[in-house]
């Protein structure tokens, strides 16, 4: 479970305070799939960073699995994320000098489990349709394939919580649908709590819950089509993504 209580964030811009988030109150139930939408500058990515403990709030607090993230030291937050949290980003964030398999093993290196996890990492790559591509480097993969490596990496440490920031933003429509379907399926099967920021309203509507931000505030919080218990994605996949 994730709780944001009175969450606010203010930056200094040109010597003046800029309030990016204002008194956000949200609860994400365990195993839920939520989409956060809103215009550019509405605070979506800032909210995700605060929920993940990548940034500190100016007001309020964040509870992850009943632990007060805002009260932890930076080392404690890093340790908690390594053991409990996965990330998927728009720009993939794969290490160019590492193979697909080695990229999937990165989060396991951080927890000291990589030596025992090579087989499970290969199984994850097989699961996302990249069996036999373990030795390929990111430059040898299409955009859709790179995002699938990123999905496998995100699930490598069996996270309780997964944050996705525009996971289909750098992909063409068809490839994006395939990646979204895979993300939703893996999330459902693992029981992970997924919070996804997206500008794609079609993708957002297929989540169980759609949260709309505007001017740093929650202006709508409603059920999406995925709340009926069925997969909202059609499962189509293209191997050729575009960066």
Image: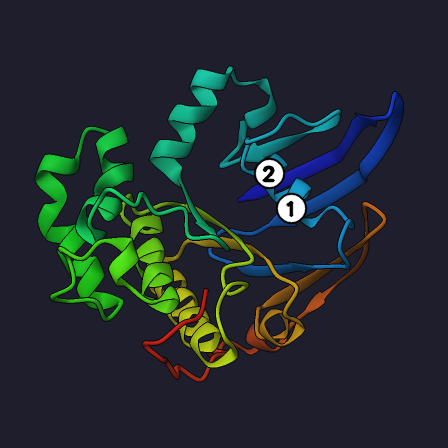
Q: Secondary structure at mark 1?
A: helix
In the displayed structure, 29 sits above or below 82; it is: below
Q: Quadrant of residue 50?
A: top right
Q: Residues within 10 Å of mark 1 (few under 14, many from 20)?
A: some
At x 47%, y 52%, the residue is 91
How many marks overall?
2
Q: Secondary structure at mark 2?
A: helix
Q: Position of residue 102 (x, y in %)?
A: 19, 45
* Rendering colour mode: rainbow
Q: Position of residue 108 (x, y in %)?
A: 23, 37
Left or right of 7, for residue 92? left
Q: Position of residue 189 (x, y in %)?
A: 33, 64
Q: Residues within 10 Å of mark 2 (few under 14, many from 20)?
A: some
Left or right of 136, for residue 83? right
The mark found on residue 49 in the picture is 2
At x 47%, y 73%, the residue is 176
In the displayed structure, 103 sits above or below 232; it is: above
Q: Nearer the viewer, residue 84 or 87?
A: 87
Provide the residue designation for mark 1.
45
At x 47%, y 77%, the residue is 177
Mark 2 and mark 1: Cα distance apart in space: 6 Å
Q: Position of residue 142 (x, y in %)?
A: 33, 67
Q: Quadrant of residue 239?
A: bottom left
The mark found on residue 190 in the picture is none
- Residue farthest right in this picture: 16
The answer to whether the residue labelled 2 contacts the one labelled 1, judged by CB atoms less than 8 Å apart, is yes
In the displayed structure, 205 sits above or below 139; it is: below
Q: Nearer the viewer, residue 157 or 45?
A: 45
Q: Nearer the viewer, residue 227 or 44?
A: 44
At x 51%, y 15%, the residue is 73
Q: Nearer the viewer, residue 25 or 155?
A: 155
């Amino acid at each position: 479970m994730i709780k944001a209580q009175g969450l606010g964030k203010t930056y200094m811009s040109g010597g003046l305070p800029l309030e990016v988030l204002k008194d956000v109150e949200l609860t994400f139930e365990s195993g839920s799939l939520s989409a956060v939408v809103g215009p550019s500058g509405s605070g979506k990515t800032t909210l995700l960073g605060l929920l993940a403990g990548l940034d500190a709030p100016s007001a309020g607090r964040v509870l992850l699995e009943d632990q007060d993230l805002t009260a932890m030291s930076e080392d404690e937050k890093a340790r908690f994320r390594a053991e409990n949290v996965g990330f998927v980003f728009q720009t993939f964030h794969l290490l160019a000098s590492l193979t697909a398999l080695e990229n999937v093993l990165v989060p396991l290196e951080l927890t000291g489990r990589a030596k025992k996890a090579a087989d499970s990492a290969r199984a994850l790559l097989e699961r996302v349709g990249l069996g036999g591509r373990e030795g390929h480097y990111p430059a040898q993969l299409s955009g859709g394939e790179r995002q699938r490596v990123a999905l496998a990496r995100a699930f490598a440490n069996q996270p309780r919580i997964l944050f996705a920031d525009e996971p289909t933003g750098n992909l063409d429509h068809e490839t994006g649908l395939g990646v979204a379907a895979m993300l939703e399926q893996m999330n459902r099967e693992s029981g992970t709590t997924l919070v996804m920021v997206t500008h794609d309203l079609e993708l957002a509507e297929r989540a169980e819950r759609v949260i709309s931000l505007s001017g740093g505030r929650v202006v709508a919080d409603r059920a999406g089509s995925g709340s009926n218990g069925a997969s909202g994605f059609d499962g189509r996949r293209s191997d050729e993504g575009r960066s």
